[in-house]
Amino acid sequence: MTNFSSMGAAVIGTGFIGSVHTWALRRLGVQVRGVLGSSPERGAEGAAAMGVSQAYPSLEALLADPSVDVVHVTSPNHLHYPQVKAILAAGKHVICEKPLAMTSQQSAEMTALAEASGRVCAVCYNVRFYPLNQHARGMVAAGELGDIRFVTGHYHQDWLAKPTDWNWRLETDAGGELRSVGDIGTHWIDLTSFITGQKVVSVLADLTTFIPERQKPVGPVATFSQATGETEARQIQTDDAAMIMLRFAGGAKGVMSTSQINVGRKNSLQWDIAGADASAAWDSETPDHMFIGHRDAPNQILQRDGTLMNGLGGAAAMLPGGHVEGFADTFHALFSQVYADAALGARSDGATYASFADGDYEMRVCDAVLASAKSGTWADV
Ligand code: SOE
């Protein structure tokens, strides 16, 4: 394991996911030089809670710090575009949370700027970095499933199931026009495209807002937590759930659903990929086990063990043997690739983290989902 103690990072955002980034950086030995909060007070609170030595007073101050090599963007979606542009103009590497932008116009521009900058730019599609997902990509690439036919599954959560549940993602101004699809559906699309090596080319989508009016707390509320106290009624335009049929470039077809109101489903991403010769299936709530299905032989369950997996899977495994790995470990694995590339100054050939071009592809799939939901017909990506 490489030690990145000569490298410095700054993290924009001190909420749930900003903390996950900071913990993963610590495990890699990266020096977390400071954080930037949504206000100086929140920045100071976040820095104190995470034991980081400073909260920058502004993005300008953060970018002026010469000891920062890589900037992590974990702010609400509407800030990704201006912040990433400023970070690239300052000549720093960037890891941006998903979705990359609010629109595909923004993501296309960010991708062009990233390519021109010569900096290492990644989108934080962390689910790729469960070792068995990397292993599955290796299996498909080696032809072990045969031609890919049918790709099905879901990404369901329940943290927005009640009319009193609130988060900035609910409003289009901060989160974008799509919510369950943009926030978690793009993880599923990214992951299945990554594993199968096939991009989605056409979609038929149906979006639903089951809770059209919610109670917004007057004070701040963190992701996955519930506020108490005074609230005001807000009309909701974004999707609580979606059903999407998919056509992939290589001929595969699929169907998936997203939901943030499925009571009891905390953070459930499942995929099931049927090839002509074998199938595979995986569930984020039991991430160290993968189903491998056969027609004429007993089915198998592969338990994650770096020494029993292919090269991609083995490389992503952070712990030896069958020691259980989880959500936080995926950030550790993703960042270890990005920091190795940042130390060299360029993306390496074997890198498997999502590029800005991948993030732009997700935004174009979102455009097609919206267009299809509005027209009631298939829409091309
Ligand atoms: C909220 O839905 C959220 O934090 C997503 O934004 C993340 O991408 C997902 O990993 C967990 O849930």
Image (tube, grey):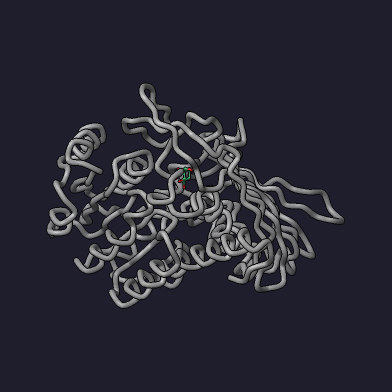
Residue furthest to the bottom in view is 116
On screen, residue 244 versus residue 359, left or right, reads: right
> For this rendering, which residue is in front, 381 or 336?
381
> What x and y, as percent, mark residue 380?
62, 71
Relative vertical location of residue 156 with respect to residue 61 in this rendering, above or below: above
Does residue 111 appear in this view?
Answer: yes
> For this rendering, which residue is in front, 178 or 271?
178
Q: Residue at x 51, y 36 (%)?
A: 213
Position of the C terminus by quadrant: bottom right
Residue furthest to the top in view is 229
> What x and y, as percent, mark residue 84?
29, 62
Q: Quadrant of residue 141?
A: bottom right
Q: Residue at x 36, y 24 (%)?
A: 230
Relative vertical location of residue 331 with respect to residue 278 in this rendering, above or below: above
Q: Residue at x 57, y 54 (%)?
A: 188
> For this rendering, which residue is in front, 230 or 355?
230
> What x and y, as percent, mark residue 79?
32, 55
> What x and y, as percent, mark residue 17?
38, 43
Relative vertical location of residue 56 with respect to residue 186 in this rendering, above or below: above
